[in-house]
Image: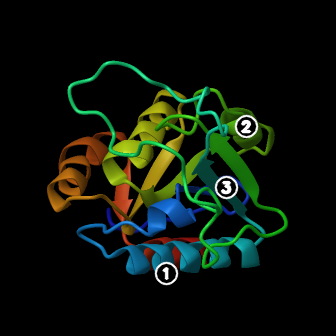
């Protein structure tokens, strides 16, 4: 099998999509436009669902008073402040949450810390994770690093993710992800799971 071809076992593979929720898919992204990211992620999710493979939708949400947010002194704070608009944390309807999907709510960048993601994956015999979402260098990368340290095989659907700036996306794609997994396109993933 050529190095660029992959084969995914639907019984042992989960699609994990990070923060494809209304408040985040409304932001400008690069190098892939937000609509293209959501469209590619939805294509993969729909194929996983057709094959009865696991789809995990991860969202970030906080209590109304914000008391469960991580707040530390940093040199470059996140620009999100104050109250979120109604529906900010709802999944983008183009992705949707279907029966059989698992929805994980996180309180920080990574989807493993403080959630039941690892438990849900292990109880279902998942050994491989296909990752996508926004932002490549925040939620996707943090989740990927944790998954790698937990021994999951990682496949990055590169055109189903993006960041706020092209260089932030490119750094993860060029320097981090090749060391912890395989970088492929949406088409590669769809072909691998057929």
Mark 2 or mark 1, whichever is nearer to me? 1
Tell me where residue 25 appears, x and y as whole percent: 46, 67
Image position of 15 with respect to 123: above or below: below
Query: Which is more toward the observer, 81 or 119?
Result: 81
Query: Which residue is outermost to the left?
Result: 167
- In the picture of the structure, the residue carrying the numbered disc 1 is 39
Query: Residue placed at 75% from the left, 54% from the top?
Result: 102
**Residue 156: image location, x then y, percent:** 41, 57
Residue designated by label 2: 122
Q: Earlier in the sequence, mark 2 or mark 1?
A: 1
**Do residues under tags 2 and 1 come within 8 Å of each other at their CB atoms?**
no
Residue 35 image-quadrant placement: bottom left
Where residue 101 sits, quadrant-wise, is bottom right
| Residue identified by numbered label 3 | 56
Residue drawn at (30%, 67%), measured in percent from left and top?
Answer: 29
As helix, strand or loop, the secondary structure at mark 1 comes to helix
Q: CA distance from mark 1 to mark 3?
A: 16 Å
Residue 180 in the image, given as x and y percentages of width and height: 36, 40
Depicted 58 relative to depicted 96: above or below? above
> Which image quarter holds the N terminus?
bottom left
Q: Is residue 175 visible?
A: yes
């Amino acid at each position: 099998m050529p190095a660029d071809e992959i084969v995914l076992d639907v019984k042992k593979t989960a699609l994990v999509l990070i923060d494809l929720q209304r408040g985040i898919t409304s932001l400008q992204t690069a190098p892939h436009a937000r609509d293209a990211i959501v469209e590619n992620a939805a294509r993969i999710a729909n194929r996983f669902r057709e094959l009865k493979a696991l789809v995990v939708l991860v969202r970030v949400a906080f209590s109304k008073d914000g008391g469960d947010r991580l707040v530390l002194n940093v040199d470059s704070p996140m620009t999100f402040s104050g109250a979120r608009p109604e529906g900010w944390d709802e999944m983008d309807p183009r992705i949707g949450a279907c029966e059989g999907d698992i929805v994980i709510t996180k309180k920080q960048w990574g989807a493993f810390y403080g959630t039941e993601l690892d438990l849900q994956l292990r109880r279902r015999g998942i050994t491989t994770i296909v990752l996508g979402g926004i932002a490549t260098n925040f939620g996707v990368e943090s989740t990927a690093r944790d998954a790698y340290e937990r021994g999951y095989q990682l496949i990055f659907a590169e055109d189903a993710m993006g960041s706020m700036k092209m260089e932030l996306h490119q750094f993860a794609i060029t320097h981090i992800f090749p060391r912890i997994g395989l970088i492929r396109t949406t088409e590669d993933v769809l072909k691998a799971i057929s």
